[in-house]
Structure formats: structure tokens, C-alpha cells
Image (tube, rainbow, N blue to C red):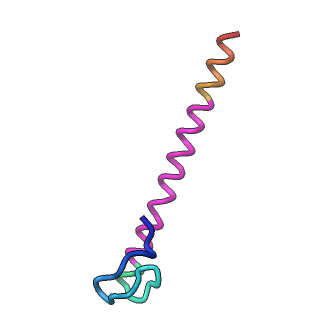
Amino acid sequence: MCCEHLICANCARPVSEGRCSVCRDHKERMHQGGSVSTSALTAVLLTLLVAVAFLTTTMH
């Protein structure tokens, strides 16, 4: 979910503007979650590449 479509209950402004402390805190939390999923995706892709490499070497 993107924070540009969220409205802050504290200041009634878009969260993406970060006008109050509640907006800034929520925006920071939303943007921190993206780095975890990127690293998890990278780990899964590397595992798949290693598995494919192992299978291709054992089949020859």
C-alpha cells in the first residue's frame, strides 16, 4: 500500500506530506517494510538459482 492515498486522522492531510508527527511516523514505518521484502525476494531468487545450478550439474 502506498502512503500517498492515506489521510492522517490527526491532521486530516495526506500522510505522504508528513505534516505532523503521526504522519511522519506512519510514513517511515510504511517505507521500512519495503526493504525487508526486497531482501527476502533476493534470498529466494538466489536459492532458486543455486538449486537450478545444482540440478543442471548433476544431470550431466
Q: Nearer the viewer, residue 2 or 31?
A: 2
Corner quadrant of residue 22: bottom left
Residue drawn at the location 44% of the way across and 60% of the way down: 33
Residue drawn at the location 41% of the way across and 83% of the way down: 14
- In this view, the residue farthest toward the front is 5
The quadrant the C terminus occupies is: top right
Q: Is residue 49 above or below residue 20?
A: above
Corner quadrant of residue 54: top right
Instruction: Where is residue 49? Give x, y as percent.
Output: 62, 31
- In this view, the residue farthest toward the right is 60
Q: Main secondary structure of the magenta part?
A: helix
Read off the magenta span.
25-49
Residue 7 shown left or right of residue 47 in the figure: left
Residue 13 shown left or right of residue 17 in the figure: left
Instruction: Where is residue 34? Give x, y as percent.
Output: 49, 59
Instruction: Where is residue 52? Give x, y as percent.
Output: 62, 25
- In this view, the residue farthest toward the top is 60
Q: Is residue 56 above or below residue 42?
A: above
| Count of marks placed on residues | 0
